[in-house]
Amino acid sequence: MIKIAICDDEPYMRDALALAISDYAKNAEPLTFAISSFTNGSALLTSGGNYDIIFLDIQMENPDGMETAEKLRKSGYSGLLIFITVLKEYVFDAFEVQAFDYLVKPLEKKRFQRTMDRAVKSIQQDTERSLLIQKGNSCMVIPLSQIVYCEIIGRKIYLHLADNQIIDYYEKLDKLEAKVDGRFFRCHRSYLVNLDFVRGCSDRQVLLPLCDKIPVSRLREQELLQALLRRMKS
């Protein structure tokens, strides 16, 4: 199931988006969609919902869509943000909060379908890549999209997840690095970071959501910047 949030202060737009998603779902089986609607950014921010896609109106009151997006990213939200706007000049600001796409009001059916096709494909690709962890006689499957960073202390790997869980198990960091994909970067001999969660780099530290920081080696700072640029382009 793909969880979608619609945040717009205009009732007709919330209804139009919900109808467009429902129409899209008819031709997307066996996928199913759950839709939640919010009248303002504050309601969305306090909902606690873990949404795969958020449709967010830019022109809202206190906070507006861009401010809401910034707060979502700072709180660790890593899903897809799709802005809804009547003014195209706001589009450039969307890059600052890693927006997936933007749609201009009123909705154009073919444009909406193309955006949904890309969004669903992106979600499926992220979901399909997982890490199998063995602990004693048990095992766990962890989606790579949920891992913020990995660190090694002694002989144990500690996985720090987006929901603040920490999972530890015995393995070498070199072996873990070989199992993950290009979204992960070895920023330090003891750390692997998921580039999708990186918010910046300052004073030899990688900045992460919720004000978390991990070290970056002096010799890898430039490589980190290049890796971030490649990841953003892809």
Image: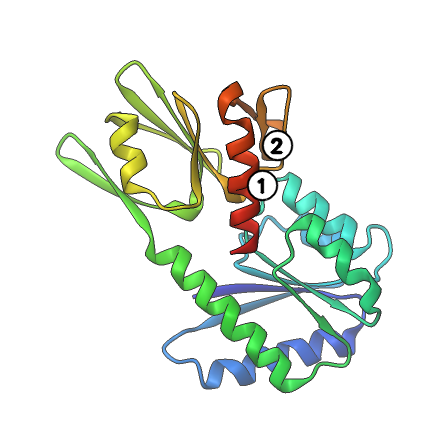
Say which quarter of the image contains residue 165: top left
Q: Position of residue 197 (x, y in %)?
A: 54, 40
Q: Amino acid at mark 2?
A: Leu
- Name, please, the residue furthest toward the top: 154
The residue depicted at 61 percent of the width and 85 percent of the height is 110
Q: Foreground residue, 36 or 52?
A: 52
Image position of 60 with respect to 189: above or below: below
Q: Label 1 amino acid?
A: Gly
- Residue at label 2? 210
Residue sticking out furthest to the left:
137
Task: Please tell me the numbered disc located at residue 76.
Answer: 1
Mark 1: give few (<14), some (14-19) or many (20+) Cα within 10 Å: some
Q: In the structure shown, which secondary structural element does the residue marked by tag 2 occupy? A: helix
Between 233 and 199, the residue placed more toward the observer is 233
Question: What is the residue that sits farthest to the right in this orientation?
Answer: 61
At a point 64% along the width and 19% down the height, the residue shown is 203
Occupied quadrant, residue 114: bottom right
Return the x and y of residue 48 as percentages of the image width and height: 59, 48
The image position of residue 172, as x and y in percent, is 25, 25
- The residue lying toward the viewer, choosing from 13 and 174, is 174
The answer to whether the residues at label 1 and label 2 have Cβ atoms under 8 Å apart is yes
Mark 1: secondary structure: loop
Which residue sits at x=33%, y=58%?
A: 128
Pick whichever of labels 1 and 2 is earlier in the sequence.
1
